[in-house]
Amino acid sequence: MRMSKYRFYFLTLLLFVATAVFAQSKSNIAVRAFYYNKNVFLRWKLDDAKSYLKCAKDGFEVERRQSGEPWQTVGTVRKGNYVDIDDYCKKNDNGILLKVMLYKEEYLQQLFDENPTADRDSIRRKFEKNIKGSDDDLYEFLLLGSEFSVDVAKFAALNFMDDKVMTQQEYEYRIRPVDSKLKYTSEVVKVSTARNYSLPQMSKLSVERTRENLIFRWRITKEMKEGFAGYELERSADGKKFELVNDVPIIHLVSTKSTKDTCIYTDTLPKCGKTYYYRVRGFSRFGLSGPYSNIVTERCEDDLTVFPKIETIEFNKNGEAEIKWIAENPDNQKFEGFEVQRAADINLEKTGFLSITKRLSVSTTSYVDKKPLKHNFYRILAIGENGQMNYGNIVYATPHDTLPPSIPTGLKGVIDSAGVLTLTWNPNPEPEIRGYKVYFANDSNDVFVSACDTFLKTPQYNDTLFLGSLTNDIYYKVAAVGENYGQSEKSPAIKVVKPDTIAPAVAVFKSVKQDSTGAMIVEWYDSPSTDLAKTVLVRFREKHVGWDTLGVWSGDSTVKMIKDTADFIGENVTYRILVSDESGNESASLDYVIKTQYVKPHCAKDLQVTVDRNLGEIELHWSKCGCNVFMTRIYRIDDGVQRLLVTLEGQETGYIDSKVAIGHTYQYLVLPITKKMSQVEKSEIIAY
């Protein structure tokens, strides 16, 4: 049986109670009134729920007089009957407090009738559990509901319209209970029918757009605070037909000094590439809407994902640079075209990229730079239909010699025991070259990368290598660079062997954890050294003597995990991995120290979480595992903060959380309490 029909969100609504219209009064019945369209509208409230329920039982009488005349009864106001209120609640959730306040027993009987096979005591307990707060709390919320709905105010007998008044007059009003035994005094209010009540003009609406949201702001003056009960934000796709954005009234909440005079509301644009129009207006505590604010517009544009990728840059015999590119367009976006940009230095703070073309069509895929610089950094700019921009890759190009230098010959090298590398080769036969470039790789099939940033003037290269790397050899090539930066092909690669003086790289623990049976699951990453000969896993237990060998494996073994099933009793345990290479060099991993634990039993299982955003609730259910559970504690992690929600009796296997808020993430922990404690069951993280 679902009890959502009478589940209320008092925690959320409690934020709004401060907006109640009635100021403090020495009378038992506070009254407010205004004149509009030839009628006088009245609203009132009593000090507390007990007084209200007494008076609402038989209703109220509205009395009126003019100066010097006796009081006259002009109307009797009674609460709505249960049938009418029930029909209203089927269409309007904000009327459910009427049923709880005015017809609690009738409401319970309705629930009994709707669930004839269910246990009545269970229905009653769940009903009372879901109605959080005292009668005074419920009464405050009922008053708040009356602020936003004339229908609720009428059903609650807190509203009256006097349609028998004359213009250009002054009247006094007061309210008294129909039951004359109830001695409650009423505030006397004066109303002038000389002019209609009107809501003040809205202040200026402004909007700013962040990456994902629109933030609307408008000022709240003292006059507006007294006139408006809430606000409505409307949106239009064409500037003519507007639709309501907010599902519930926008209420001005003071959170900081900077927002005490400003109302703030956040919205998201339904679609990018389209202009939307917004306006806001206030409404009164008697259901009247005020004038609209100014209209503001906003739009967002989809990011341009067209990526213009330079494929080649070639210099012809005239020294001109021909640039060719392709346009990667994974989203098949429409765009306006390209511009070719060039910089003289990659340090953009000095020079920056400048367009060297006008707008090129989307079908253009090449361009000839007739006057390239000595050093050129090129990129292609793609331009979207709405001015979006996206840059492609940056490619360096410089005019080169027509004939590059010859390939260097005679390359040879050696590495001594200190790691000092010496490369030498034959000088090039060309009379003038700019220098040489050295390239290296860890494997002959790898890509060779530059070993130095400058050109070498002589056919020799020295470097100091780290002998503790994972490879024992390294490969080198050399190329000659002409005066105009034309570069020869690279020489054939040579292999230079490092002296084997280092221990193998250590193995690394991946994880060590205790499973539900109490066994330790030990996982590790092997040493990456290519000359690995042996791996040994050892263990030391607190209060035991010596290290225990758990396994020995050869260098080509694929074992990377074992299950240590010793009887652990909560002591500290240390694991270590020893590896050795073919030369006898040995390395030890960092010790992994872990405190073992007694294994707690699982006393709850199959934790299920159901989210109902329409009702504003998250429902938990779980199953028992046969433990003797005394009680169950429910914890909630709200955006990283954990707190205890409730403590349930041991036999209960479900809970409904109605104190949730949009935009939060939640995780729930269920902890059954037993004689020896038990495991905590965790839910998935829920984005509400």
Image (tube, rainbow, N blue to C red):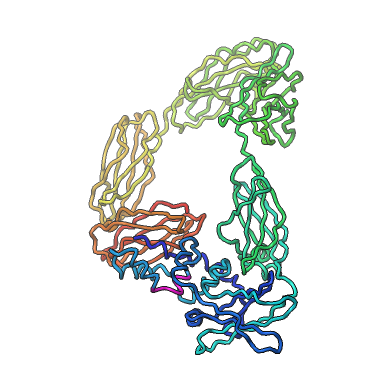
Is-magenta flag for residue 104? yes
* Percent of width and height locating residue 640: 47, 57
Q: Is residue 600 visible?
A: no
Q: Tag count in the figure?
A: 0
* Percent of width and height locating residue 518: 26, 52
Quadrant position of the N terminus in the picture: bottom left
Is-magenta flag for residue 590? no
Q: Is residue 270 left or right of residue 524?
A: right
Q: Is residue 587 left or right of residue 329?
A: left
Q: State the residue in front, 419 or 557.
A: 557
Measuring 37% from the left and 58% from the top, which residue is drawn there?
A: 620
What are the residue bounds of the magenta stretch?
98-105
Q: Is residue 592 left or right of residue 404?
A: left
Q: Quadrant of residue 64?
A: bottom right
Measuring 55% from the left and 13% from the top, which residue is drawn there?
A: 410
Vertical placement of 666 versus 454: above or below?
A: below
Q: State the residue in front, 247 or 416.
A: 247
* Percent of width and height locating residue 4: 41, 61
* Percent of width and height locating residue 605: 30, 54
